[in-house]
Amino acid sequence: MTYKTSGVCSTEIELDIEEKSEIIRSVRFKNGCAGNASGLSRLLVGMKVDDVIKRLEGTTCGNKSTSCPDQLSKALKKWRSSK
């Protein structure tokens, strides 16, 4: 799944999720802070979708009302609603 972000430096997030177990296989951010995005992506592999949403939802970046982690939680919610 590819999710177009809003309000952050990253322009999109690519997700690969094991449908049955709802385990994240990979996360790739396009643009944004390369080191942070890479580190975050590595930490999330193997985690359940619900756990990631709970941990990342509402995270802000500086004075923005969202962040790349928050956008990822939105992407995961969209994935869930499309099942």
Image (spheres, rainbow, N blue to C red):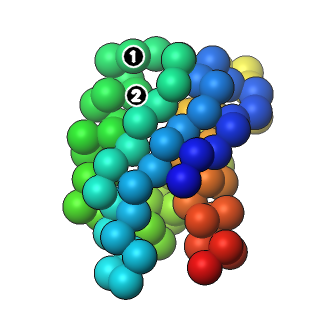
Where 23 falls versus 12 (above or below)?
Answer: below
Where 9 falls versus 40 (above or below)?
Answer: above
Where 18 falls versus 21 (above or below)?
Answer: above
- Answer with the quarter of the image where residue 6 lies: top right
Image side of residue 50 versus residue 4, left or right: left
Image side of residue 23 versus residue 49, left or right: left
Residue 34: mark: 1
Task: Check whether the beta carbons of the residues at disc 1 and disc 2 lie within 8 A of each other.
Answer: yes
Identity of the residue drawn at 51% across and 25% down: 30
Where 6 falls versus 17 (above or below)?
Answer: above
Identity of the residue drawn at 30% across and 63% down: 47
Identity of the residue drawn at 53% across and 17% down: 32
Q: Between marks 1 and 2, how big is the CA–CA gap?
A: 5 Å
Q: Position of residue 19 (x, y in %)?
A: 41, 76
Q: Nearer the viewer, residue 46 or 65?
A: 46
Q: Position of residue 68 (x, y in %)?
A: 56, 34
Q: Amino acid at mark 1?
A: Ala
Q: Residues within 10 Å of mark 2 (few under 14, many from 20)?
A: many
- Residue 70 appears anywhere in the view: no
Callout 2: SS:
helix
Q: Which residue is mark 2?
A: 37
